Amino acid sequence: MTKFSSIYPNIAAWTEFHGWIEIGQDDDAQSFVRALDMGGMVWEGKSKYKTVDAALDDLESALEKILRRLGKISP
């Protein structure tokens, strides 16, 4: 079995060192998947995805860009 962190290293890094993620619909958010930190919403995805994997792939890509911009991963 593959570890989550090997498939989604940027999500794992984000949740371990920087903030948290939320997955699912609620009354306060338009998006299905979100990344947050102590300052609030850092990124939010689309309102619907075909699969949870597609949502996680979108989040992984977005967090890679955010972590790169923060200097937490090399370009």
Image (cartoon, rainbow, N blue to C red):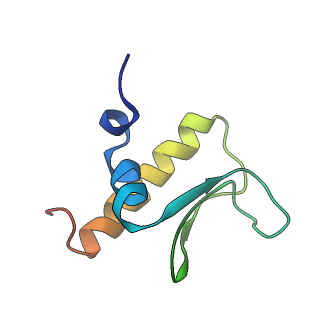
Please indicate whether residue 17 sits to the left or right of residue 45 in the image: left
Residue at 85%, 65% (x, y): give it: 27
Residue at 55%, 35% (x, y): give it: 53
Please indicate whether residue 33 sits to the left or right of residue 26 in the image: left
The picture quadrant where one finds residue 69 is bottom left
Residue 55 position, x and y percent, is 57, 45
Residue 9 position, x and y percent, is 32, 45
Up the image or down, 67 lies above or below 39; here it is above
Work out whether residue 48 or residue 73 is closer to the camera in this orientation and state it.
Answer: 73
Q: How many numbered marks have been drawn onto this rendered protein structure?
A: 0
Location of the C terminus by quadrant is bottom left
Q: Which residue appears farthest toward the left when viewing the image?
A: 74
Q: Which residue appears farthest toward the right when viewing the image?
A: 27
Q: Which residue appears farthest toward the top when viewing the image?
A: 1
Up the image or down, 19 lies above or below 11; here it is below
The picture quadrant where one finds residue 45 is bottom right
Residue at 39%, 59% (x, y): give it: 14
Residue 59 position, x and y percent, is 48, 53
The picture quadrant where one finds residue 22 is bottom right
Up the image or down, 12 lies above or below 6; here it is below
Residue 47 position, x and y percent, is 72, 56
Location of the N terminus by quadrant is top left
Residue at 55%, 58% (x, y): give it: 21
